[in-house]
Amino acid sequence: MIAFDGNKNYQLKAGDYCIARKNHLVRYTKFKNEGLFEKIIIVFDEPFLRKFIDRNTPVMQSWAVDNSFLFIEEDKLINNFILSLGPYYNTNEQIDDQFSYVKREELLLILLRNNPKLTAVFFNFAVPQKIDLEEFMNRNFRFNISMERFAFLTGRSLSTFKRDFQKVFSFNPGQWLTKKRLDEAYFLLKNEKQKPTEVYLNVGFEDLSHFSFAFKKQFGIAPSELNLE
C-alpha cells in the first residue's frame, strides 16, 4: 500500500506495522497480492487513551516528530500479539467488544515499552494550532474533505477560516478549490498523458461526470478530448 499525505509517500509492504496519526490527511493506493488485500486496524481513540492514562499513569516524554506514519520495527511481542487476536474475532471479522479494551491495552503497553517516546504521540489531545493557510492548502487541496475539517486542521473556526482564506487567496474556499483541482487535472491530462479515470479522484473529485462537467465549463473542452489534441 502506498500512502500520500500531500508532502511525502509512505510505502507499506506485507507484514509492516505502522501508526497512522490523527489529524493527518492521507490518501491510500492499495495493491492486491494474488487478488487479496488484508489488513488489521486497531484504533486508539481519545476516550480509550484517557482511560489508559488513569489506569497506568505512563511517564510522559517529548518527541518532535511530524510524519503521518510511524513505522514500528518487527518485534516478537507484536508478532505474538497479532497471532493472539485470532480467537477473539467474530463472524464479521471484528473483535468481540468484551475483549476490545483488554487487547488494545495490551498492544499499547507493548508499544510504549518498546518506545516510551510514543507517549508524545498517543497522549497529545491538543487541537491543531493556527498554521500557515497558504502552505497548508497548496499542499492539501487534493483531499476531498469538508470545509469544517480544513478549518479545524488549520487551527481555525469555520468563520475565521473563510475570512482568512479570502484575504490570502482572494477567492472563497469553494471557488479556489475547484479552480486549483481543475488546473492540476489539466496539467496531468496534458503533460503527463494520464486518463480522466486516473485523474479525477487524485485531484479531489468524487464523481467522474461532475469532474467532466466542471472541466468543460472551465476549459471549453471535455477532459477525454484533451489527449487527442
Image: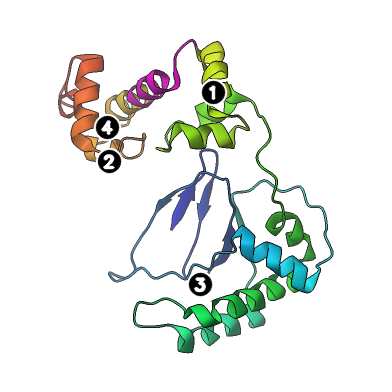
Judged left or right of residue 116, residue 75 is left
Mark nearer the N terminus (1 vs 4): 1
Crowding at mark 1 (Cα within 10 Å: few <14, some 14-19, many 20+): few
State which mark lies toward you, 1 or 2.
1
Residue of label 1: 159
Residue of label 4: 193
Q: Which amino acid, mark 1? A: Ser
Q: Is residue 166 magenta?
A: no
Figure check: 154 above or below 2: above
Instruction: State the CA–CA distance, disc 1 to disc 3.
Output: 44 Å
Q: Quadrant of the C terminus?
A: top left
Instruction: State the CA–CA distance, disc 2 to disc 3.
Output: 28 Å
Which region of the structure is painted magenta?
A: 170-182
Q: Estimate the x, y position of residue 76 in percent, counting from the top left.
A: 65, 82
Q: Estimate the x, y position of residue 55 in percent, counting from the top left.
A: 75, 73
The residue at the point 23 percent across, 40 percent down is 197
Instruction: State the CA–CA distance, disc 2 to disc 4.
Output: 10 Å
Residue of label 2: 198
Q: Quadrant of the N terminus?
A: bottom left
Answer yes or no: is residue 29 visible.
yes
Figure check: 148 above or below 48: above
Q: Which amino acid, mark 2? A: Glu
Give the quarter of the image for residue 193: top left
